[in-house]
Image (cartoon, grey):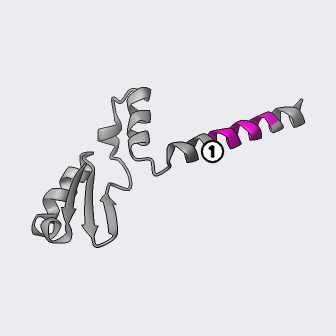
Amino acid sequence: MKTLTVQEASKSLGEWLRRAASGEQIAINEGECTVLLQPLFESQEAAKGLTAREALRRLQSRSRLTAEQAADYLREVRAERLADRGRNG
């Protein structure tokens, strides 16, 4: 991940935006705050040809959950599915 100050980022903002749009992780620091540049939606052209595994890796690399939060979430989903099975017989 490339980390920049606001001053560094502002000098070549277009360049950093293009790099972030192509998948590179770009972070900008301002004091105690750090933001991550990333596209809101991946272009359909960029998504074409991805294997399911690669698509999952990309999603995981953008995850904002800690490993513990992800494990908690998966436990909740599993409990919900088991409860649904019990109700639906």
Residue lying at 24% horizontally and 47% vertically, measured from the top left: 24
Q: Which residue is mark 1?
A: 73
Image side of residue 30 versus residue 69, left or right: left
Quarter of the picture holding the C terminus: top right
Image coordinates for residue 64, horizontal then vertical, percent: 46, 52
Q: Left or right? Give the position of 81 relative to 19.
A: right
Residue 20 sits inside the magenta stretch: no
Residue 83, picture quadrant: top right
Helix, strand or loop at disc 1? helix
Query: Where is 10 relative to 22, above or below?
Result: below
Residue extending furthest left? 11
Query: How many numbered callouts?
Result: 1
- Left or right of 10? Residue 46 is right
Classify 10 Å Cα crowding around label 1: few (below 14), some (14-19), many (20 and above). few
Q: Main structural element of the magenta stretch: helix, strand or loop? A: helix
Residue at (38% x, 56% y) in the render: 40
The image position of residue 66, as x and y in percent, is 50, 47
Residue 15, position as x, y percentages in the image: 13, 57
Asked if residue 81 is among those painted magenta in the image, a careful observer would answer yes
User: Residue drawn 27% across and 50% down?
Assistant: 25
| Three-letter amino acid code of the residue under disc 1 | Tyr
**x%, y% of residue 77?**
68, 40
In the image, which residues are magenta? Answer: 74-82
